[in-house]
Amino acid sequence: MDMTRSRDRMVEHLVTRRGICDRGVINAMRTVPREKFVDPGFEEFAYEDAPLSIGDGQTISQPFIVALMIEKADLSAGDKVLEVGTGSGYASALISLIARYVYSIERHERLALQARERFEKLGYANIDVQVGDGSKGWAKAAPFNAIIVSAGAPEVPSALKEQLDLGGRLIIPVGRGDAQRLKRITRTGAAAFEEIDLGGVFFVPLIGEDAWTAEHPMYT
Ligand code: SAM
């Protein structure tokens, strides 16, 4: 099934209707086959601007939100990036076409293994996937030029701020339920950070030691 036209139409929608304008993001979205990152049987919906279930109660995020987060991370070709919440692997694949290297961490083993297999099969060689709690970041690979968190946290985990390089950008949804806000935090000094609000979002919870607990009443 050739999905090129559907993919181009989706990108056109992101550019003309949703205001995505970063060349790197647009090129990556034109290149990565989203239909290979959705569950079997869902391929025909791959280019709708909507999230889709990927099992384990998780989702591949809406293309517009993925594009927005990557655009706001302001990536350059030499950047080392951490993605927290690998999920299907789609966002990591996009980032890998823009930045130098992607460290991607996922708490569900099945999803992490599946994403790793996809990267191998599709030839994304600059992504390392690990199973673990991304609310603690990935200390061994730090510092990062950018960190993109694809799940909503109650507060900004301190480890993620600490693992930003000087000038590094952290994109993270913060807050509960329908009160989640997407934030960009930029490290401007050893202990100095600037925060801006990028608007309301709705993400599955970031579950971990420095995030929501799996038993939290909101998420059981
Ligand atoms: N970026 C993904 C994609 O392109 O398919 C979508 C991510 S999905 C919205 C959020 C993911 O975050 C889920 O797969 C979930 O299991 C994962 N997650 C939640 N808490 C986590 C944590 N503490 N560490 C790592 N992954 C976590």
Image (cartoon, rainbow, N blue to C red):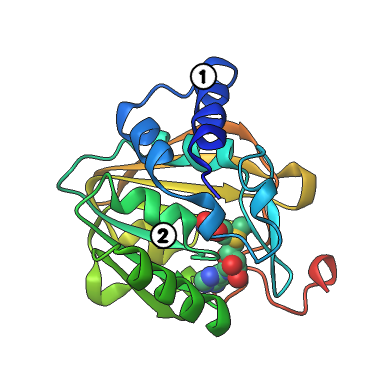
Q: On screen, 14 above or below 206?
A: above
Q: Secondary structure at mark 2?
A: strand
Check mark 2 vs ligand 1: CB closer than 8 Å? yes or no: yes
Question: Residue at point 52% right, 59% down?
Answer: 36
Residue 157 position (above or below residue 21) = below
Question: Badge 1 local density, few (<14 within 10 Å), some, or many (20+)?
Answer: few
Q: Amino acid at mark 2?
A: Glu
Q: Nearer the viewer's eye, disc 2 or disc 1? A: 1
**Label 1 CB, ligand 1: below 8 Å?**
no
Residue farthest toward the front in the current orientation of the protein: 1
Tell me if label 2 and label 1 are in contact, CB under 8 Å.
no
Foreground residue, 45 or 150?
A: 45
Between 177 and 27, the one nearer to me in the picture: 27
Identify the residue at image location x=42%, y=76%: 117
Measured in 3D between alpha carbons, the distance from the residue under mark 2 to the one under mark 1, in whole angstroms, is 23 Å
Of mark 2 and mark 1, the one earlier in the sequence is 1
Label 2 neighbour load within 10 Å: few <14, some 14-19, many 20+:
many
Residue 29 showing in the rendered view: yes
Disc 2 designates what residue? 83
Instruction: Tell me where residue 75 sits by quadrant.
Output: top left
Residue 12: x and y, percent? 52, 22
Of 137 and 26, nearer the camera is 26
User: Residue 119: x percent and y percent?
Assistant: 37, 67
Q: How far across and down, in percent of the image, does residue 207 sit?
A: 62, 72
Image location (x, y in percent) of residue 18: 57, 22
Q: Quick check: can you spot residue 152?
A: no
Horizontal side of 138 relative to 79 (left or right) equals right
Disc 1 marks a residue whose amino acid type is Gly
| The disc label shown at residue 19, or none | 1
